[in-house]
Amino acid sequence: MTQLLRVDLLRAALVLLLVIGLGACEKLRTQQPDLTLPTTEEVAEFYSQFQGISSIELSGNVVVVRVEQSASQIQFAGGLWAQLGPYIYLLSPATRNLFITYPGVAAVRVITFTGKEEEVARTMLVRDTMGDYQWQRSVELLRRAMEDGGKSHLRVGDLVRWAEQYVDYEYNPTYVRK
């Protein structure tokens, strides 16, 4: 009889644990992530170390960063530099940190333009397109391109080819020939 009582107590304990576990799972399943969007000022803080940003705005849940890119730089360095322009901002740790901090941000779009308001490039990175490895690789390629890009266009080309695998992009054919 004692053994029967132990079995019943064990079954009751297991049922209780199962009920508690299912309740916890249901609670986790119904909890919604915080989809609060940042203000433009909060987004600007993420990109505060960059120069050339003319405006930051939110278009729904997409952050739009507009950057002036020197036409003389593009003329001097060529189409590869026209392609590179938006990736400096888009593939930076600032963008990744923005995605991590604000799960409600669905994408970041970077638009580069000349001082004459002529669009050079338009790129967009959608949240969760890149995993940890891709982000680490992106930041490393960006660092190399920024350090060695003036000496070796290979580093810039490496970054552009990498970015084009993960990013929606359009280049102005005036600056970038296909």
Image (cartoon, rainbow, N blue to C red):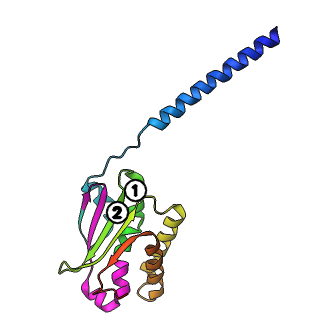
Image quadrant assignment for residue 63: bottom left
Q: Would residue 58 be counted in the magenta stretch? A: yes
Tell me the amino acid under the disc marked 1: Phe
Residue drawn at point x = 76 percent, y = 17 percent: 7
Instruction: Give how far across and how far down residue 68 sits, in percent.
Output: 25, 76
Q: Which residues are magenta?
A: 57-85
Residue that badge 2 annotates: 108
Q: Is residue 89 left or right of residue 113?
A: right
- Of the pair 53 and 134, the residue shown nearer to us: 134
Residue drawn at point x = 48 percent, y = 70 percent: 138
Instruction: Give how far across and how far down residue 176 sits, in percent.
Output: 33, 86
- Of the pair 53 and 166, the residue shown nearer to us: 166
For residue 151, above or below residue 56:
below
Q: Mark 1–mark 2 contact, CB under 8 Å? A: yes
Q: Would residue 6 be counted in the magenta stretch? A: no
- Considering only order in the chain, which callout, 2 or 1, is on the residue closer to the N terminus? 1
For residue 158, above or below residue 133:
below
Residue that badge 1 annotates: 99
